Amino acid sequence: MPEVQTASAIQLWGAGGFGFVIGWFVYYVNRYRKGDVQFSDITTLIGILGGGAILALFDAQTDLFGAYGIGLFAGFFGYFLFLTLWVSLSKNFTVDWFLDGRRKKPTSGFEIPGEIRQTTSAMAISNEENSGFND
């Protein structure tokens, strides 16, 4: 019988932290994608999450792979929970933002200085909406 190697606490935390970062990033990328979801995206995602590179780092039947999986879960759903928290605390967003991006129009008390680069994510303000915003 082969000798069973146990992982140290630092190895488990490292694998879990790595999984957390990957999970957080996967949720972020999927949240702000511009195109429709396609089957090839799912295939790519499975390749990233459980593919050869990950299995080279963490053998499939070890505590390290388990810690990576827990970290992946925590990062993916942690992003969603933080997003839900910040939307619920904001006076400018409601749960409708999750459905179709609806949000309240900024009031005259807000300003975006001219030297600030425009947002290029899903929450960007279009030029039509931005006209008169800096008055």
Image: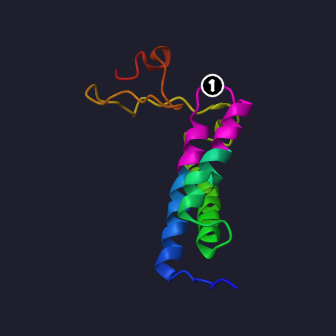
Q: Nearer the viewer, residue 105 or 47?
A: 47
In the image, taking residue 1 as reference, residue 135 lies left or right, namely left
> From what the image shows, is residue 25 above or below residue 75?
above
Kindly identify the residue that appears in the image at 52 percent across and 32 percent down: 123
Residue picked out by circle 1: 35
Kindly identify the residue that appears in the image at 59 percent across and 33 percent down: 103
Magenta-highlighted residues: 25-45
Q: Is residue 120 magenta?
A: no
**In which quadrant of the rendered image does the C terminus lie?**
top left
Element carrying mark 1: loop
Q: Nearer the viewer, residue 130 or 16?
A: 16
The picture places residue 130, in percent across and down from the top left corner, at 44, 20
The picture places residue 27, in percent across and down from the top left corner, at 60, 46
**Circle 1: is it few (<14), some (14-19), or many (20+) Cα within 10 Å?**
few
Magenta stretch, main secondary structure, is helix
In the image, taking residue 22 as reference, residue 39 lies left or right, namely right
> From what the image shows, is residue 73 above or below residue 39?
below
Residue 84 can be seen, yes or no: no
The picture places residue 23, in percent across and down from the top left corner, at 58, 54
Q: Nearer the viewer, residue 3 or 57?
A: 3
